[in-house]
Amino acid sequence: MAFTVFILQLAVRILSFPLYLLKFLGLWNQISKKWFPYYMMKFSATYNGQMAGKKQELFSKLQDFAGPSGKLSLLEVGSGTGTNFKFYPPGCRVTCVDPNPNFEKFLFKSIAENRHLQFERFLVAAGENMHQVADSSVDVVVCTTVLCSMENQEQMLREVCRVLRPGGAFFFIEHVADKHSTWNYFWQQVVEPAWYLVFDGCYLTRESWKALERASFSKLKLQHIQPPLSCKVLRPHVYGYAVK
């Protein structure tokens, strides 16, 4: 089976040769950073429709972690187009972090459509290095479909723990690798070389729950789910929250 995967991956790489050439010439990163927000605007609308129930269920717990003032201070890592804003509680103070500055105009459109939130700032930064955010300064950190493209998941989770106040929580919804015995995992491996290039560094075969289990949270509530997404290789998910 491993040999079959190798041969099919090679075929995928050959078919993706123009993208690899652009990457080699240093052009692809600039192109993908510009087009990716437009793709995510379309994808997020579909994804939200298919995941709305799970998001509502999970994010209904956000307010439980508000500070003494009763107002929730929330940091979203990899905020993208602001697709999660409508699920956040009224009065929530939101800071957004994303490494791609081209998301900014889409983000501000979402802010204008979600007046129930108090937007604070947008930071262009990687999740692994959020030095602009002070230690123990937020009640909640949120990331959805972000760990798949983090260069260093462990470092990003260390940063999450740093910025969370004691007793604060990290909320996550992430697509992950399927069980290794499944055909779906087989195809995740096969298409991943091209997928990674086209979708801005996204890995299909990451077992992100392992990084979450290793992180220094005092409590972790994590579920494996298979939402009925139209793209089958994206169906395996983990979601839940972890308390500092």
Image (cartoon, helix red, strand yellow):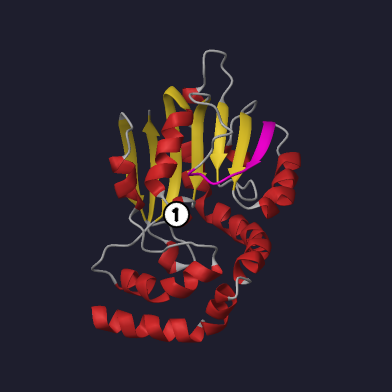
Q: Is residue 5 left or right of residue 23?
A: left
Q: Is residue 124 magenta?
A: yes
Does any portion of residue 84 appear in the rendered image?
Answer: no
Give the residues in magenta.
118-128
Q: Which residue is mark 1?
A: 151
Which element carries disc 1, helix, strand or loop? loop
Looking at the image, residue 42 lies above or below residue 62: below
- x, y (%) of residue 144? 50, 47
Task: For the N terminus, give its image quadrant.
Answer: bottom left
Residue 113 found in image quarter: top right
Task: For the C terminus, give its image quadrant.
Answer: top left
- x, y (%) of residue 169? 43, 30
- x, y (%) of residue 154? 37, 45
Q: Is residue 53 left or right of residue 179?
A: right
Residue 110 found in image quarter: top right
- x, y (%) of residue 17? 52, 83
Which residue is located at x 46 percent, y 39 percent?
57
Residue nearer the viewer, 78 or 180: 78
Label 1: few (<14), some or many (≥20) within 10 Å? some
Which secondary structure dominates the residues rendered in magenta? strand
Q: Residue furthest top?
A: 68
Which residue is located at x 65 percent, y 65 percent?
30
Circle 1: residue type: Glu
Residue nearer the viewer, 99 or 145: 99
